[in-house]
Amino acid sequence: MDTCTSAGACVHTPVTCASGDACNDDMCIPEEGGCVAVPKPAGTTCNDDKVCTGANETDVCNAEGKCGGTAIAGCCLTDADCNDSNACTADVCNTTTNTCSNTETPPTAAACHVYVCDQEIGWIDTDVTCIDDGNICTVEACDPTQGTTGACVTTVNQDPPEGTQEVSCNDGLDNDCDGLIDSADADCAPPVTCPCDSNPMWSVAYFQAAIDADENVACRKYGTGDMSMWEMLYQRSIDVWSGKCWSGPSSIPLTPEQIPVCEQRIAEIASQLNPPVTCVGYGGGGGAF
């Protein structure tokens, strides 16, 4: 520093620069106009006074004279430092230990409900899903009357897949939930047929041929020779209700289930003939089937 004394003489006093800091030395450089900060060598130990950059011995100076340390994973100063981008967690910084906690705490759910976490939206109220036991005759559902949270219970399926009658008879399932499976269920029994259907004398063609040959044969009275078609059908009906059907040289016994089927077959034959065999009012019996 240059000063002039009262005696008119110049005094040149050396400039004293500040002591600088951990990463810089203050030096007087005339060309720079005085004291300037000159960075210390990179790697010089320093202290950035930051909690979350590790112990002081890990803080070092860089080439620009700045002090810094390596960030400590999970270290925090405020709750904002603990954000885990999960909408279902409470993000809290413990400022004593400078550590984060991210705790999932779902709301209290109503009976038969459960909260499911969506990390973007938060907690979503959802119905409880009960595990299906694989039995089509039972239903698994949550009963809200069971305790405070509800519980899954198994009940009888009131709406079986095939209602009250088995239709699928070869799948190994009790589709109408009556306790019987496939062939064990009467619904799967073969349809009842009339055993005499295969005999030509039980066909529409047989009777129609006789009518076509002699139109009077349909309702011929007793005592005129051959039996009329009506009489023949009527006799078939009597045989059926007595538990047999006449079919050629010998009669075939009928089961109780076959009797109404054979009787229906006789009525169908009578209605399909042309003209239909009704024969109302004839002395040898008569009427419509």
Image (spheres, helix red, strand yellow):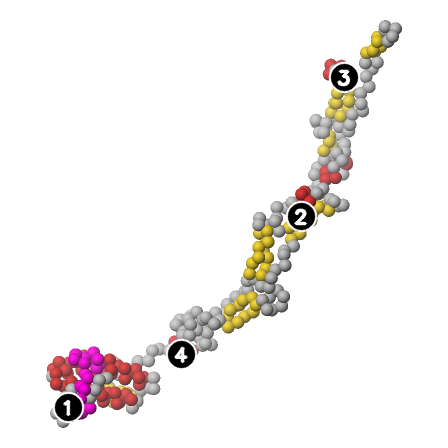
Quarter of the figure that contains the N terminus:
top right
Three-letter amino acid code at the position of disc 4: Ala
Q: Determine the CA span between mark 2 and mark 4.
A: 66 Å
Q: Nearer the viewer, residue 52 or 219?
A: 219
- Closest to the camera, between mark 3 and mark 4, is 3
Residue 208 is left or right of residue 87, and the answer is left
Which residue bears the numbered disc 1? Answer: 221
Q: Nearer the viewer, residue 196 or 118?
A: 118
Q: Nearer the viewer, residue 235 or 253?
A: 235
Q: Secondary structure at mark 3?
A: strand
Circle nearer the N terminus (3, 2) = 3
Within 10 Å of disc 1 (Cα), the crowding (few <14, some 14-19, many 20+) is: many
- Residue 63 falls in image quadrant: top right
Mark count: 4
Q: Position of residue 184 (x, y in %)?
A: 42, 78
Circle nearer the N terminus (3, 4) = 3
Three-letter amino acid code at the position of disc 2: Asp
Q: Determine the CA span between mark 3 and mark 1.
A: 152 Å
Within 10 Å of disc 4 (Cα), the crowding (few <14, some 14-19, many 20+) is: few
Q: Position of residue 151 (x, y in %)?
A: 59, 67
Which residue bears the numbered disc 3? Answer: 34
93 vs 129: above or below? above
Q: Which residues are the magenta region?
A: 269-285
Within 10 Å of disc 2 (Cα), the crowding (few <14, some 14-19, many 20+) is: many
User: In the drawing, what numbered circle is on residue 8?
Assistant: none
Three-letter amino acid code at the position of disc 3: Gly
Which residue bears the numbered disc 2? Answer: 91
- Closest to the camera, between mark 2 and mark 4, is 2
Circle nearer the N terminus (2, 4) = 2
The residue furthest bottom is 223
Circle nearer the N terminus (3, 1) = 3
